[in-house]
Image: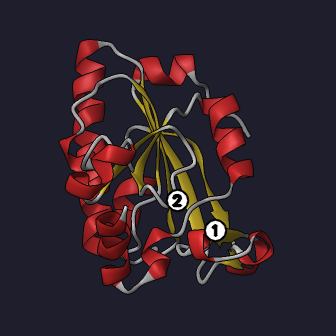
Amino acid sequence: LFCMCLRYEALGCHGHQAAISPDVFDVLRSHLGVETECFASPLNAQLRSYFSAFYDVDAPFGSHGSFFALESLKGSFEANPPFEPELMRAAVDHASALMQRADDAGTALSFAFVVPTWESLPFHRLLVESRWRRGTALRLEADMHGFLDGAQHEKRAESRLRVSSFGTTVCVLQSARGAKKWPVKE
């Protein structure tokens, strides 16, 4: 526990571990069958199944390791990567490669991405213009939503939620079979 907490404290930037709220996870679970978080930590995971940055210290708490090691071609995932442009692009690229393989295999695969609305950056364009995007990309103004602070384990319940620093885009990528199994609706 000490090593895991120290590793995340060493990052020195709690914002990189902000999470969507339990209410949003409830919607993703009930409407899109989301079962696994692609970018979480033992300190902020909302679902039992999650991937995290530091497998060596996170594995005893249930982490499956790095999202970039994910090979599964089936299932429904939530992806809220740390808001770092190159990492977000790598996440979109990895999900896209898995989508292609899932379409080729005829399996149901789905990713609900939650990213900042940084429209001029490559990751955002790749995401909203993806051939696997289903439905309309949802855009939320910064002052209309919030995230759970990355230091939520150190805060009282009433101060865990903070207003978003940026607009947010929610985009769902799905294989053909995934779109049939978990249809994206308004």
Q: Position of residue 156 (x, y in %)?
A: 73, 74
Q: Quadrant of the N terminus?
A: bottom left
Task: Give residue 56's mark.
Answer: none
Q: Residues within 10 Å of mark 2 (few under 14, many from 20)?
A: some
Which secondary structure, mark 1?
strand
Provide residue 105's location: percent of width, then percent of height.
Answer: 25, 14
Q: Is residue 59 above or below residue 17?
A: above
| Circle 2/circle 1 CB separation < 8 Å | yes
Is residue 98 something that shows in the picture?
yes
Q: Nearer the viewer, residue 169 or 120?
A: 169
Q: Decide which of tag 2 and tag 1 comes sooner along the chain.
A: 2
Q: Which residue is mark 2?
A: 44
Determine whether 171 is above or below 175 in the image.
below
Give x and y (percent) for residue 80: 47, 58
Cα gap from disc 2 to disc 1, whole angstroms: 9 Å
Q: Is residue 165 left or right of residue 175?
A: right
Q: Nearer the viewer, mark 2 or mark 1?
A: 2
Q: Which residue is mark 1?
A: 148
Q: Is residue 84 visible?
A: no
Q: Position of residue 132 (x, y in %)?
A: 40, 37
Q: Is residue 76 left or right of residue 141?
A: left
Amino acid type indicated by mark 1: Leu
